[in-house]
Image (cartoon, rainbow, N blue to C red):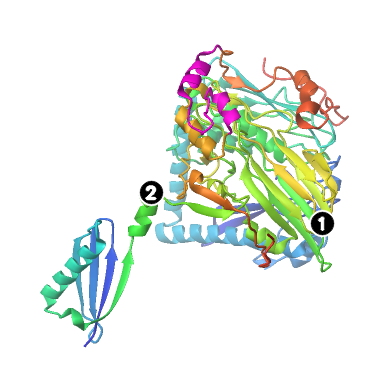
Amino acid sequence: MSHANDWLVLMPVYHQGRLVGWASMFGHMTDVGGKVPGSLPTDATSIYEEGVVVPPFKLYRRGELNAETLGVILNQVRMKEWNRSDLNAIVAACRTAAQRVTELCDRFGQDTYLSALDALLDRNYRAMKQLIETTIPAGETLTFTDYVCDDGMGYGPYKIHCAMYREGDKVVLDFAGTDPQSPGPINYYLNEDLYKMFFTIYMIMVFDPQILWNDGGYPLIDVRIPEGTLLKPRYPAALSCRTHVLGRIFDILGGLLGQRQPEFLNAAGFSDSPHLMYSGYDASGQWFQLYQIGFGGIPGRPFGDGPDGHSLWPSFTNVPNEFLEAYFPLVIERYETVADSGGPGRFRGGNGVDIAYRFLADGEVSIHDDRWFTYPWGVNGGLPGGRSRKVLQRADGSTQTLPSKCDHIRVRAGDLLHYVTWGGGGWGDPYERDPELVALEARRGLVTADGARRYGVVLATDGTVDVVATRELRTQPRAGAQVFDFGFSSVDELRERCLAETGLPAPQPPVFGPGAAAQAGTAGHG
Amino acid sequence: MTYRLGVDVGGTFTDLLLINESTGETWRAKVPSTPADQSAGVLAGLEKLCAATGLDPAGIGSVLHGTTVATNAVLEGRGARVGLLVTEGYRQVLQVARSFVPGGLGGWIIWPKPEPLAALEDTGEIAERVSARDEVLR
């Protein structure tokens, strides 16, 4: 568990008195109390500000609910019935899993069931061993660095650095060189085994999706995270807004795997889970509290274009606007992707999404997003995707660019918020994209005529390809393609143009507090 | 004595099931489907059943008709080219759909996103809006 909103249930599975397994499920509670609705305060400097932190305890003892303890916990959250219902759903999921395991044991016998599990783990172990040997070069250290733009308190960007190298038949993932922990809430307490899971599934998906996925290959993976860093902060660091770093380590995995195999390399994607919180009292005096998750551009892939406005996370779907408008005082006036926000490439990055929320009641808004300062990078000649932005058009006609991470934004009935997420990076040389496809996407409103020029395509006024002008544009000299195009040459250069480009002041270089590891930035693999 | 006929028109075969409602007795027939005119295959199957049982088609009281033709058209993308009219601001509703990417963690790496049934270039917007409470907003 990496922040207080996540509640995890573990349930032992017994069959005829023998422990044959564990069922587990977790879920992000909409609210766990604390200083702001949604419990992700952007200015928290310790975990004590982030709501109720539930230590491991027995929710059920011999099948009987521990109602007293649960009552104490629920008394500290804003939407008790939601937590209660979500917890019920989690328990039901565990019971379903336990039921299925029990049925397997009934049908095949305990010994057959358990030895089959061992065989499945062994199958993954052998596949991963082969995959590591054939895809990760021995005797070479691959590194990758990416950033989280800011900490919500005006400081950033924060650097995440990972080195990948072989030690015998093992692969080492070493995060030495990652910035020290933040004084703010963007720290992500990354469990080593969890990263083994991320690594395993990415290896499989990138290199050989037919391989069975489980944790059999964990002994082949060594994850090293220095204490006192962004990824292993010391208690009582604030953790609530960890979603940005959590998302970014997937871009880092992508940047490491395939770095030596461009045909397997993916661009940077929609590596975040942006949130919008909107709360207050509606016309009938009822408290309302919205927790909405945003989606953006899937990166350009060796496989093809990245989908527009989709989820990088499994099983996530958007909440239908019909539902939102029925239960919350708002109207969603526009819901569309942003033309040209997908990074140009032979395979285009997916576009980010612009959702226009018209608020119908006075209230308060919180925003959690990233990639407003750095770019979702492109690969193999592909260009970076567009950044995120948040613009509030007040009912009085004024317009305000909101920070990427903020709380306590007072909104009034009639105000309109444009919540714009970012696109995916492009894959491959955009000049290799079929001009007819670029023209089609212009007709579809996914790229503009100006944007088409970034593919070396000139469109005539009727929207068709100007073949002669396109040929001429595509033969003009260009800068050489890079494996990674981050969209900036240095963080300082990025700072200089930040205000003009984003409407927001550049973040200040992070100042690390006394809890942070002084050596975190220097220790590591020699 | 009444009979009930069930028909299932599939992509390859048309299956028919005839039931004698008094006795529960059943007969089956399988004939090739006729995509150019699906009714031809159904009638051929009916004739086959009548020939086998000596039944007068007038004795059939009801026909229950099911088909996977529409499902197949959707799956194979072989239906007509259609346009779609949507509320202004929602032109890309099928492009974004539910934002769902199947395949678990990392599934996006290999997911081929299907083309929407109505192409985006054939989707138009109407300047209107009705609220969740059925009020006409514009």
The residue where tag 2 is placed is B77
A465 in magenta: yes
Compared with B23, A352 (above or below) is above
Compared with A167, B4 (above or below) is below
Asked if badges 1 and 2 are on one and the same chain, I answer no
Is residue B10 rendered to the left or right of residue B106? left
A293 in magenta: no
**CA–CA distance between discs 1 and 2?**
45 Å
Expressed as whole percent of the image width and height from the top left, the position of residue A207 reads 47, 30
The residue where tag 1 is placed is A413
Question: What SS does tag 1 mark?
Answer: loop
Residue sitting nearer the eye, B97 or B38: B38
Q: Which image quarter holds the C terminus of chain B? A: bottom right
Is residue A40 rendered to the left or right of residue A9? right
Instruction: Determine the residue located farthest toward the top in the rendered image.
Output: A477
Task: Assess disc 1: are there few (<14), some (14-19) or many (≥20) residues with their C-alpha within 10 Å of its C-alpha.
Answer: some
Magenta stretch in the rendered image: A448-477
Q: Chain of mark 1?
A: A
Q: Chain of mark 2?
A: B
Displayed quadrant of residue B14: bottom left
Expressed as whole percent of the image width and height from the top left, the position of residue A112 reads 42, 52
